[in-house]
Image: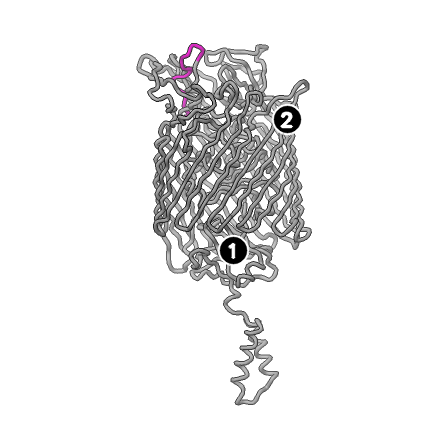
Amino acid sequence: MLVWLRLLRHLRRSIKPPLCMGLFKECWLLLLLFTCGLLPGTAQIIHVYDLERRTPVVGATAFFFPGGQTALSDESGSLNMMLPELCDRVLVEHPDYPPAVFTHQAIERDSHRIWLQAEARLLGEVMVTASKSLQAVADIPSQTLVLDRARIQQGMVQTTADLLMSSGEIAVQKSQLGGGSPILRGFEANKVLLVIDGVRMNNLIFRGGHLQNSITTDPLAMERVEVVFGPAAVLYGSDALGGTIHFMTRKPKFSGFQDRASLSGQALARYSSANNEATASLQLNYGRSKWAVLTAVSASRFGDLRQGAWRPGGQGSWGLKPFVVSTSESRDTALPNPDPGVQSPSGYRQVNAMQKWAWMPTAKARHQLNLQFSTSSDIPRYDRLSEQSADGKPRFAQWYYGPQDRALASYEYQRQGGDWYDAFVITADLQYLGESRHDRKFGQAWLNHRGERVYIGGLGLDLTRHFSKHELHAGMDFSEQRVHSEAHTENRFTGESGILDTRYPAGGAGMRFAGIYGIHTWRITPRFQLQQGLRLQYARLDADFGDAPLFPLPVKEVTQEHLSFDGSISFKARLWEQLHAFAAASSALRVPNVDDLGKVFESLPGMVNLPNPGLEPEKYYSGEIGLRWLHGKKLRLQCSAYRGSFRNAITSQPATYEGRDSIFYNGELSAVLQQSNTARASLCGLHASLSVHFFEWLQWSSTINYTYGRIHTDTTDYPLDHIPPAFGKTELAADAGRARFRVEIHYHRAKPVEDTNLFGEDNFQYATPAGTPGWWVLNVGAGVQLSHTFEVNVGCENIFDRHYRSFASGISAPGRNLMISARASF
């Protein structure tokens, strides 16, 4: 402004009009400057508005790139700054809206106004931060998936695993109702990286079979879930082979007013008929101008799950539970199940709690403390409880997981704009996980107890720097992890205790990770982009097997150290304004963890896995090509093809113990297996998704996924486990503002027995003799916004009450499921 006043003063002195004309000339000059656009008006100050309500958005944070400047919108929606000339894009974040990117040209074209929209249909490109960098979807050289808060709230899913499966792009395996193991591109469990709020969830006992850790996150507290498919070892190190699933919980919301506080919240109640689920949730947010706190609590009760009654294709009695076990003080009795379609016992309860504190002393600095806790009741292991011995009796009278506890405390410091960086983030976290397994054979008195306690400490630093056409993302991370394993057996009649082999090394085990990475992005031209990444990682494993009286091993202690490099390179081209093509290649290494190397467990009935201290890291090389067509809101197309090759792939293989191929374990003669490094394995696959907006209120979308994998030996090739059959989803959704309606169909092809791995984790014993049948189900849902603060959603899943099981699952999916939820906000 001072520059323009000086210019006005200079012009006034130069013209020198008569005294009587002075006032007129000065007004004329001011009008001339305004008309020519030389004097800035209020339109040049950037404002942020809600697109639907046409009201200012308070508390929105804007990040200007390059340069790293930041600004916070006030009660009028103003960012109190003009658009920098060198800025080419602006990222805008707000707790009530998905992150969005706006170009310099778009902001100028809209008179320096930014419009945010709460739904997924954004004017700016949706951001995906699971790659640790602020990137638009179009710039990410891999298949991506974003599930935003609107979709989460309308879906009425019971767990986060159900949320992932509802996308139609992620297959989910379930061994029990309280489970859910996501499968990405034929990878599962410890080969898929789970992240919550920037903190790794994977730990040293993440197993290679099936995991239920995803259900310890609360879907009702999610702001969004972001998935990047394919290896991400450069960013995260070990485990990120199939992809990265980033659970992002809601953020505290500042008031945006200097002298006033704000209080907001919401309450939810939901019921589902298939398992008599009842869920209640409460969220409260208190915000001041510079600090805010968010509290979220939810509690759920899940009853025994009823499967579908329509059994097409000659399923016979497959999946029915003909018996239930009744236990008295003196004996176990198998009684007829009054309703074989009810999978009993399978119900459990769960409680989730979260509290976040945020402090923003300046527009460029932000501190956040994140506290989370999740616990459950005992969770019946339904697949094992449904097994029968050769004589027709149940194999187990009891088999359940003890309460699954997860506690997280993390601190995050974000800083924008500095002399040697544009942005950096420091994170520190502490985690605790407690889990246990309890089993007793039918008719036997001894109940086995095995429990694990895991302690994790982590530290990370990530920074970003822009140099004209170049961007540098670099960081380092460190993690220390320990597991303590205990076991004993208990006589249920006398209370007597006995010795029992522990699941993991009895003397304790630990792992240490340290890594440093760098990713360079070169925007060669506005149409072409080249990206290269490199990571150096160190990993160490220590295990003390101690005295194992039941399975004395040749070695008492094991120490492994690995130093590795992982790299990636990708190229992206904008062929036309909305059409983008990419190609990427990467390498990823997964270090054997304690679960791979030092575990004793029964993998299948009559098969026992024993430790293998000689395991080596598995190496995965992957390539991917793809296309994206992002034609605004009207059309979105994404398709990709990938191929990967394993070296030293870790799979379950027949082995011997003291020269014998079978041993007695838990009173049963069992074949000996070990996790071993297979010579090589390969997989390939395709993905395609299409979304079309016929009208502003009507959208059609469809997705399809296919993966093929084989283990290669000198004599023959056989199926790689964890490979789901082709699957997908088609949906038609209508949104008229206050009212919404959707109809969707999910479909899976059959998985024949010849494509099933009989030694791995495909669980052929829970399928039919011919394999896992194909299936499709039809779901409908509707929602009504009765007022600004009250919303009701209803739905019906599996309308035709079809019986089916997802690939490798040991429990059948819900039958016809009627759902209703009510949400009140203030």
Helix, strand or loop at disc 1?
strand
Q: Earlier in the sequence, mark 2 or mark 1?
A: 1
Dot 1 surroundings within 10 Å: few (below 14), some, or many (20 or more)?
many
Residue segment shown in magenta? 389-401
The amino acid type of the residue labelled 2 equals Ala
Q: Which mark is residue 681?
A: 2
| Above or below: residue 600 compared with residue 303 | above
| Above or below: residue 790 compared with residue 3 | above
Q: Which mark is residue 605?
A: none
Between 213 and 785, which is closer to the camera in this rendering? 785
Using residue 527 as the reference point, say whether residue 318 is left or right of it: left
Residue 826, can we see it? Answer: no
Q: Residue 381: horizontal and vertical position, in percent? A: 42, 24
Between 391 and 226, which is closer to the camera in this rendering? 391
| Above or below: residue 643 compared with residue 138 | above
Q: Residue 563: horizontal and vertical position, in percent? A: 64, 33
Q: Nearer the viewer, mark 2 or mark 1?
A: 2
Using residue 18 as the reference point, say whether residue 261 is left or right of it: left
Residue 386, can we see it? Answer: yes
The amino acid type of the residue labelled 1 equals Ala
Q: Which mark is residue 62?
A: 1
Q: CA distance from mark 2 to mark 1?
A: 46 Å
Q: Was residue 780 drawn as part of the magenta stretch in this picture?
A: no
Q: Residue 528: horizontal and vertical position, in percent? A: 67, 49
Q: Residue 473: horizontal and vertical position, in percent? A: 61, 46
